[in-house]
Image (cartoon, rainbow, N blue to C red):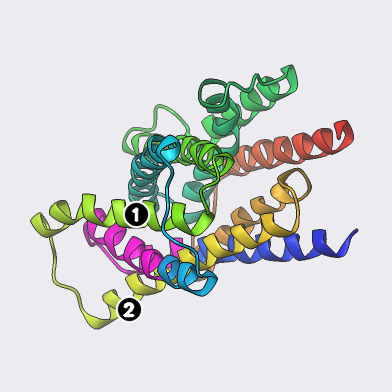
C-alpha cells in the first residue's frame, strides 16, 4: 500500500472519529432546540474555514457559473444537518449515523440528474441493497421511531445530494474552504431567526458541548478534505464506514445503547455493499 494511501486512510478514520464525537456532543448538550444546536455547530465551522482561507492566502471567490451549485450545496446541506441533528436526539447514535451514511448511495442517484453521470447496473444493485439495509434500521410500522428514522434517512439523502453539488462546484474550480465557509455562513444566517424565536438559555456545560460539537465537526471536515488530498475516493472511501463502529462504541459508553438484531443486519448490508462497491471499482480501475 502506497504511503499517500495510508495517510489518506488515517485522515478518513480521523474524520470518522470527529463526526462520531460531534453526534455524542450534540446529544450531551441536552434537550435544546435543534436550530440552536445547528447554529453553534456551523458557527465554529465558519471560524475554522476563515482560518483555513487566511492560512492558505486564498481569496473568497465563487465564479458566476458556480454560484447556483454552491447555493444548492449550502441549502440542501443545511437541511441535511437539521435532519441529522433531529435524528441524533431521537434515535440511538449508531442508527442515526448509519442512516446518514446512506449518503454515498444517494449520491449515485443524484449524480444522474446533477452531473449527468449514468450509473452502471452495479451501482443500481448497490443502491437497492443499501436501501434494504436502511429499511432494517428504520423498521417501518413502529410508530414514532419509524418517523424519526425517516428523518434520519432524509438527512442522508440531503448529504448525498449536497456532496454531489460539492463535486460540481469543485469541478468548476471552487476551493474546499470556500465551499465550507459558504455553507457555514448560509446555515448560520438562515437558522438564526428560528433559533432566536425558540432560544433556550444554556448553562456553561451545554454551551461547552455545543462548541465541542462544532470543533468535532470541523475536525471531521478537515479530515475528509485532507484524506482526499492524499488519495482518490475509490481507494479510501469505504474506510469512512468505520464511523458506524465509533458511533456504536460511543453510544454504548455514554448512553448504554445497544442496537437490535434488525439494526445490526442493516449495518452489515450497508457496510458490506460499500465494501463490495469499493472492491469492484478498484478492480475496474
Q: Hey, which quadrant is residue 243 in on the image?
A: bottom right
Magenta stretch: residue 130 in it? no
In percent of width and height, residue 89 lies at 34, 54
Residue 181, x across and y down, in percent: 40, 58
Residue under label 2? 208
Circles 1 and 2: CB atoms closer than 8 Å: no
- Residue 229 quadrant: bottom right
Image location of residue 10, percent across then percent down: 72, 66
* 260 lies above or below 201: above
Position of residue 44 relative to residue 144, above or below, is below
What residue is disc 1 on?
89
Q: Residue placed at 33% from the left, 70% from the top?
A: 210
Screen quadrant of the N terminus: bottom right
Give residue 263's position: percent from left, percent from top.
Answer: 56, 42
Q: Quadrant of residue 123?
A: top right
Name the residue furthest left. Answer: 197
Q: Is residue 30 magenta?
A: yes
Which of the two discs, 1 and 2, labels the residue nearer the N terminus?
1
- Residue that lies at the very extreme toward the bottom in this rendered image: 204
Q: Residue at x 53, y 68 (%)?
A: 219
- The residue segment tinted magenta is 22-47
Amino acid at each position: 500500500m502506497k504511503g499517500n494511501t495510508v495517510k489518506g486512510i488515517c485522515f478518513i478514520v480521523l474524520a470518522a472519529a470527529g463526526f462520531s464525537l460531534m453526534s455524542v456532543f450534540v446529544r450531551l448538550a441536552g434537550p435544546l432546540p435543534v436550530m440552536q444546536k445547528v447554529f453553534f455547530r456551523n458557527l465554529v465551522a465558519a471560524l475554522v474555514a476563515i482560518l483555513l482561507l487566511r492560512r492558505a492566502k486564498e481569496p473568497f471567490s465563487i465564479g458566476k457559473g458556480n454560484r447556483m451549485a454552491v447555493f444548492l450545496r449550502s441549502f440542501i446541506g443545511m437541511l441535511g444537518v437539521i435532519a441529522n441533528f433531529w435524528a441524533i436526539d431521537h434515535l440511538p447514535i449508531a442508527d442515526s449515523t448509519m442512516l446518514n451514511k446512506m449518503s454515498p448511495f444517494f449520491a449515485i442517484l443524484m449524480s444522474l440528474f446533477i452531473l449527468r453521470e449514468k450509473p452502471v447496473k452495479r451501482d443500481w444493485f448497490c443502491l437497492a441493497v443499501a436501501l434494504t439495509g436502511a429499511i432494517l434500521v428504520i423498521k417501518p410500522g413502529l410508530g414514532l421511531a419509524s418517523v424519526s428514522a425517516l428523518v434520519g434517512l432524509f438527512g442522508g439523502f440531503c448529504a448525498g445530494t449536497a456532496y454531489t453539488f460539492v463535486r460540481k462546484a469543485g469541478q468548476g474550480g471552487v476551493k474546499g474552504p470556500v465551499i465550507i465557509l459558504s455553507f457555514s455562513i448560509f446555515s448560520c444566517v438562515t437558522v438564526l431567526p428560528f433559533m432566536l424565536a425558540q432560544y433556550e438559555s444554556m448553562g456553561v456545560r451545554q454551551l461547552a458541548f455545543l462548541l465541542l460539537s462544532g470543533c468535532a465537526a470541523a475536525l471531521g471536515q478537515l479530515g475528509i478534505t485532507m484524506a482526499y488530498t492524499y488519495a482518490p475516493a475509490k481507494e479510501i472511501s469505504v474506510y469512512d464506514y468505520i464511523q458506524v463502529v465509533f458511533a456504536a462504541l460511543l453510544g454504548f459508553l455514554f448512553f448504554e445503547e445497544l442496537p437490535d438484531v434488525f439494526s445490526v443486519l442493516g449495518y452489515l448490508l450497508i457496510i458490506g455493499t460499500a465494501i463490495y462497491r469499493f472492491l469492484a471499482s478498484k478492480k475496474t480501475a
